[in-house]
Each structure stands twice: as structure tokens, then as C-alpha cells.
Image: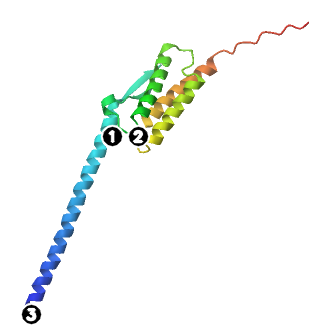
Amino acid sequence: MKKIVLPVFCLTLLASATTAAHAQVGAAIGFARMMNKRAADKNKAAATATAGSYQGKTFPMQRTPANELPKKGAEQISGLEMELERGHLALLASDSSPVYTPEQRTALQAAIASVAQVQPKANIAAYQQEAAFYLAEDARRQQAAPVAPTPPTPTN
């Protein structure tokens, strides 16, 4: 009986060590797959972001093709991209007129907030940087615009 206990104990110990090793290998494979997926997602996001330029200044312009929009938040992302495109067209249309009206500025900020709310883990830094560029240019244009003098009021 004593001669059987030691080999059984060794085999049991070996089996549990093998099981633990298999579990660790499985976890390592899962981790590697997750990291590859994250890297692919980052590369995909970087591929859709291009650099726009205006008067020697560059800014990111991210546009997501319709077939690559996520199911959750697709409407919000499309709305945000539409607001950004409106700003881009206004930026290029004139060097002195405002980029956004106050209502459009509010709509842009609401669109950014809605994307962040619907997809809290989404990387919207490129959208935010593009919006910040347009808003800064809008503020610069509004400061540079001459203030119309008020006509004198006639006194009788």
C-alpha cells in the first residue's frame, strides 16, 4: 500500500500542474488575441483620420465610411461628422466670415457630447481636435471682424 501512495501522489500533482499550465497558456493566447484586436482597431481608426490644413496649420479630419460605422452610435457619429463637414466647408468658403453661427456651434458641441455618451469607450480625440480647430478659427475671425459703428441718434 505504501508503494502505491507515492506514485499516485506524484501523478496527481503532475496532473494538476499540467492543468494549471494549460490554463495559463489559454489565458496568454486570449490576451494576445485581445491585444491584436486592440491594435487593429487603433490602426483602423488611424487609417480613417486624415490631416486637413488651413493657412499652414494642420488638424486631424476623421471620417468613418458608412459601412464601417458601429451599430451602436452610428447616427450620432454621422451627425457629428456632418457638423464637422459644415464647419470645414465654411472654413474654406471665406477667410473672414464666421465658421459657425451660435446655433451651429451649440449643435456641434451637442453632437460631440452625444457621441461620447453613446460610445463612452470610443476614441473621439480626432473629432474633438478638429472641432477645437474650427472653433478657434471661428473665435479668431469674430475678433478680427470690425464692429459696425452705431449711428448717432438725432437730438431735437
Picture layout, residue 36 above or below residue 30: above
Q: Is residue 139 visible?
A: no
Q: What residue does disc 1 label?
A: 42
Residue at 30%, 38% (x, y): give it: 43
Instruction: Say whether disc 3 or disc 1 marks the residue closer to the N-terminus.
Output: 3
Q: Position of residue 51 (x, y in %)?
A: 39, 27
Asked if labels 1 and 2 touch by Cβ distance under 8 angstroms, the answer is yes
Whole-Å distance between the Cαs marked 2 and 1?
9 Å
Q: Position of residue 141 (x, y in %)?
A: 58, 20
Mark 1 nearby-residue class (10 Å; few <14, some 14–19, many ≥20):
few
Q: What residue does disc 2 label?
A: 123
Asked if labels 1 and 3 touch by Cβ distance under 8 angstroms, the answer is no
Q: What residue does disc 3 label?
A: 1
Q: Is residue 122 visible?
A: yes
Q: Amino acid at mark 3?
A: Met
Frontmost of labels 3 and 1 is: 3
Q: Is 97 on the left-hand or right-hand side of 64?
A: right
Whole-Å distance between the Cαs marked 3 and 1?
62 Å
Q: Nearer the viewer, residue 64 or 117?
A: 117
The quadrant in which the C terminus is found is: top right
The quarter of the displayed image where residue 50 is located: top left
Instruction: Say whether disc 2 or disc 3 marks the residue closer to the N-terminus.
Output: 3
**Mark 3: which secondary structure?**
loop
Picture layout, residue 47 above or below residue 3: above
Q: Nearer the viewer, residue 56 or 79?
A: 79
